[in-house]
Image (tube, rainbow, N blue to C red):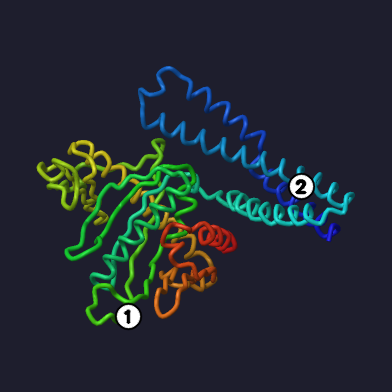
């Protein structure tokens, strides 16, 4: 048993070494020092948005460096404990080492996923839009369940979120919602969630308690960098102002503060109603529109690249995950085949394994 454990320890050490080559702790430390210097500038908060980004990036890099350091120390500690266990023939300690190695394997595997987030936009913050599709009131309720799932996932990760616009359905649930995820690599992680999500359950809205299938679409786009030029001419925009709808605090629907922008050349429509000020809502809506135009540009460029390929992609279609609550309990990703029977855990935001398997799947394509 001890020989097997030594072999596994060496394997884990080599695996972590491969991760270290990509993430580069020395470079991480250099970036942290640079950001700490920027964060200590006396005029940092003259630009609150930039200050938040600096602090968010600093926190992310510190966590990443600490994780690498702690994993390397844990491997070293396990090596010492294993040697002591063998020399003293301590079977209980050997069990402790076995349990620790199982834990380390998962932690290193999760960290390895971060090395795969090297796409052009992966490091960006994300804008997520959820829309109810086929299924009537069940679909609207399903869209709201997905919103809760993603907000809970972000909460688990310590990521800040902000809901920009919600269109409520008449009976229950939501027609659509757009929210921002303000964390480094939010887009790289959440972009794997894009597609159609299918729910099968006994409908709470059916008086005969029949099984219903409903659908909701998830769209994820990266937030536009200030350095990027996505020019939008005012004469290409139609601006509509209206009163915010749905539940809210005092005054939320007493003035025409909500803003809807229609980009006439593309037909893209965005809206924002989370601020009391019409100007603030317009600025946020413009940022969302820029992100969607950037994503449209990216998709057009990718379509040109795909057109040059002399192979069929073997597309799996737009439906990417199935959530079955009746007659059995199963959540299954239709691309990676990753699945779990813990449906409630997933709906409560336990998406880490699905996202990790999706990132690995995407890298192989």
Q: Residue 109: x, y in percent?
A: 64, 54
Q: Quadrant of residue 290?
A: top left
Tell me the tag on residue 78: 2
> Does residue 146 appear in the picture of this structure?
yes
- Percent coordinates x, y for residue 282 in the rendering: 22, 41
Kind of element beneath mark 1: strand
Percent coordinates x, y for residue 155 in the rendering? 42, 48
Query: Between residues 1 and 113, which one lies in front from this camera angle?
Result: 1
Q: Is residue 61 left or right of residue 228?
A: right
Q: Which residue is mark 1?
A: 211
Furthest residue in direction top, as rendered: 42
Q: x and y percent of residue 119 in the render?
A: 53, 50
- The residue mark sitting in front, 1 or 2, is 2
Q: Is residue 54 above or below residue 257?
A: above
Numbered disc total: 2
- State the SS at label 2: helix
Q: Going 16% across and 43% down the picture, which residue do you hit?
A: 252
In front: 360, or 199?
199
Q: Residue at x 46, y 19 (%)?
A: 41
Callout 1 environment at 10 Å: few (<14), some (14 to 19), or many (20+)? Answer: some
Task: Judge whether 29 appears above or below 133 on screen.
Answer: above
């Amino acid at each position: 048993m001890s020989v097997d454990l030594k072999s596994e320890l060496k394997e884990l050490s080599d695996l972590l070494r491969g991760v270290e080559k990509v993430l580069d702790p020395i470079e991480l430390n250099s970036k942290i020092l640079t950001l700490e210097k920027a964060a200590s500038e006396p005029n940092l908060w003259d630009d609150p948005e930039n200050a938040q980004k600096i602090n968010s990036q600093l926190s992310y890099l510190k966590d990443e460096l600490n994780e690498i350091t702690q994993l390397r120390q844990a491997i070293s500690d396990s090596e010492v404990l294993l040697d002591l266990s063998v020399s003293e023939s301590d079977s209980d300690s050997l069990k402790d080492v076995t349990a620790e190695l199982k834990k380390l394997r998962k932690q290193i595997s999760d960290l390895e996923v971060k090395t795969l987030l090297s796409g052009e936009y992966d490091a960006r913050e994300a804008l997520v839009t959820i829309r109810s599709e086929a299924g009537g009131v069940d679909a609207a309720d399903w869209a709201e369940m997905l919103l809760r799932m993603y907000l809970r996932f972000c909460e688990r990760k310590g990521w800040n979120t902000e809901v920009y616009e919600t269109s409520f359905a008449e009976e229950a649930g939501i027609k659509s919602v757009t929210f921002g995820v303000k964390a480094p690599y939010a887009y790289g992680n959440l972009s794997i969630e894009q597609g159609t999500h299918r729910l099968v359950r006994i409908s709470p809205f059916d008086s005969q308690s029949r099984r219903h299938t409903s659908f909701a679409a998830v769209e994820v786009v990266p937030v536009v960098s200030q350095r990027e030029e996505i020019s939008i001419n005012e004469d290409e925009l139609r601006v509509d102002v209206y009163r915010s709808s749905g539940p809210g605090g005092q005054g939320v629907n007493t003035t025409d503060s909500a803003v809807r922008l229609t980009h006439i050349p593309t037909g893209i429509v965005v809206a924002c109603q989370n601020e009391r000020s019409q100007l603030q809502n317009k600025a946020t809506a413009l940022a969302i529109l820029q992100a969607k135009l950037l994503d449209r540009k990216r998709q057009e460029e990718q379509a040109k690249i795909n057109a040059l390929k002399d192979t069929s992609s073997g597309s799996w279609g737009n439906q990417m995950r199935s959530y079955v609550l009746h007659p059995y309990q199963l959540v299954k990703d239709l691309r990676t085949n990753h699945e779990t029977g813990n449906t409630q855990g997933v709906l409560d935001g336990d998406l880490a394994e699905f996202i990790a398997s999706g990132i690995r799947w995407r890298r192989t394509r």
